[in-house]
Amino acid sequence: MNVADSERVSSALEHLGYEYSPQIEKADVIVLNTCVVRQSAEEKAYGRLTTLLPVKRAHPEVVINLMGCLVGIKENNPLHKRFPYVDVFSPPSDPTPLIEFLISRGDHEQEQIETTRRYAVMDGDLILPNFSQGKQVIGWIPIVYGCSHACTYCIIPYRRGIERSRPPQEILKEAEALTAQGVKEITLLGQIVDRYGKDQPEYPTLAKLMAQMSEIDGLERIRFLTSHPNWMNDELLEAVAELPKVMPHIEIPNQAGDDEVLANMKRGYTADQYRRLVEKIRSRIPGVSIATDIIVGFPGETDAQFQHTYDLLAELKLDMVHLARYSPRKGTVSQRLLEDDVTADEKWRRFRAVEKLQEEVQREIYAGYQDLTVPILFEEKAKKRWKGRTPTNKLVFVETEQDLLGQVLPVKITWTGPWSMRGQLVETQT
Ligand code: SAM
């Protein structure tokens, strides 16, 4: 989500005549886009902010913009007092405070201002920044802003506001604009992306939206994240199974495998319901990959309860686990009402246990690709190797001098590990 937000800021700034600077000391405008989902992310944001003070002292004319979840959606933010050297504060996904600040300073020619406005109307603010034009194969489009689910541990609803689905015309226009600029794969984003349109009954469902997106010539792949188990319905599974451009990969956070912990998290399902959903997804979409999110060390989580999570993961053998240690976020229900009573050491122990289990699970899943030929979309060249992904979102590296950027090509898998694979291009006869 933040990558998508940052791209929009970059492109808006370019329309005002700015260009990307690889060196912070040479920049006229510095945008710090922040995440606070865990304490460690928030500390990183404060750390980076502090390093900007000497830059501002040395160059008082530089404009510093703090953006994202650290700022949140509330007016009269206490950050204004704490960081007086920040010129502009922007809520998540909103470049306008910065653009209006720069325009109001009058640094810009009228013509540039008008161009910015025209582009904003024409393209829904979605021209890729110059530095990624023609190079960026993967694009992101937020389709649902905010979240109204209120899991007890989660700060997102407080910082990104209530759930708001974006109009389908805007999304389709952005998808067309991205494709016209060379993007081949688009990921539709939302905190609970499978709730797309639920707040706006006249909007299409996510399944129908992806069917419409599939009509875009030149767009090769469509993905969506993150789904909530309670909204993963048959229509959506049908769309993933039947629409060739929608990739067979589902990100569906489980968070815990114990019913009491799930209830304390207010997730709205039991471990067995999650298990049955995974079975259903697998039977409806053969070869599908499923990724999940897990939090270990939630308040009150006993050894036995953690073991339920471990056992569920060992049983389901999911393709990927995004793993986090519980981090109390100020103002959330769990932080206010539940004691953070699992020690840091114990959280680490549980984290490492799942990590180790998952490494073995993935080693086995990836080994199943050995000698198969798989269509890979190539994203970038890192050192001498081209990096691409399978439809199931697994990383594949291919060593070649050829330019593979943005192409979907058959690759024979020659080596597999727990996190990535290597392969060779299969010569196709034309
Ligand atoms: N909205 C999605 C969902 O259904 O949970 C996922 C998006 S959330 C921004 C990304 C992940 O961060 C969550 O799935 C959760 O595992 C993790 N997370 C959120 N709050 C957390 C907290 N207080 N401590 C640790 N991890 C947390």
Image: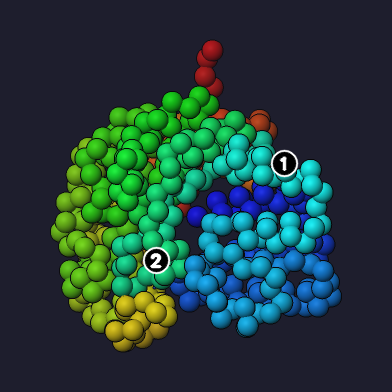
Q: Is residue 292 visible?
A: no
Looking at the rendered structure, the secondary structure element under dot 2 is helix
Residue 115's disc is 1
Q: Is residue 325 visible?
A: yes
Left or right: 220 in relation to 9: left
Q: CA distance from mark 2 to mark 1?
A: 34 Å
Q: At 26% from the left edge and 47% from the top edge, which residue is drawn?
A: 232
Q: Name the amino acid, label 2.
A: Pro
Left or right: 318 in relation to 379: left
Q: How is the image coloured?
A: rainbow
Crowd class of label 1 (few under 14; some 14 to 19; many from 20; radius 10 Å): few
Q: Which residue is mark 2?
A: 157
Left or right: 356 in relation to 43: left
Q: Is residue 348 above or below residue 359?
A: below
The x, y position of residue 5, in whole percent, is 56, 54
The x, y position of residue 161, in whole percent, is 42, 63
- Which circle's residue, 2 or 1, is located before the other in the chain? 1
Q: Is residue 148 above or below residue 181?
A: below
Task: Identify which residue, 99 or 37, lies in the foreground.
Answer: 99
Circle 2/circle 1 CB separation < 8 Å: no
The x, y position of residue 341, in whole percent, is 31, 87
Q: Name the amino acid, label 1.
A: Thr
Q: At 30% from the left edge and 29% from the top edge, which residue is drawn?
A: 242
Asked where in the image residue 300 lies, by quadrant, the reply is: bottom left
Q: At 53% from the left edge and 26% from the top edge, which residue is drawn?
A: 218
Instruction: Pick the quarter of the image with the C terminus.
Output: top right
Task: Identify which residue, 421 or 252, lies in the foreground.
Answer: 252
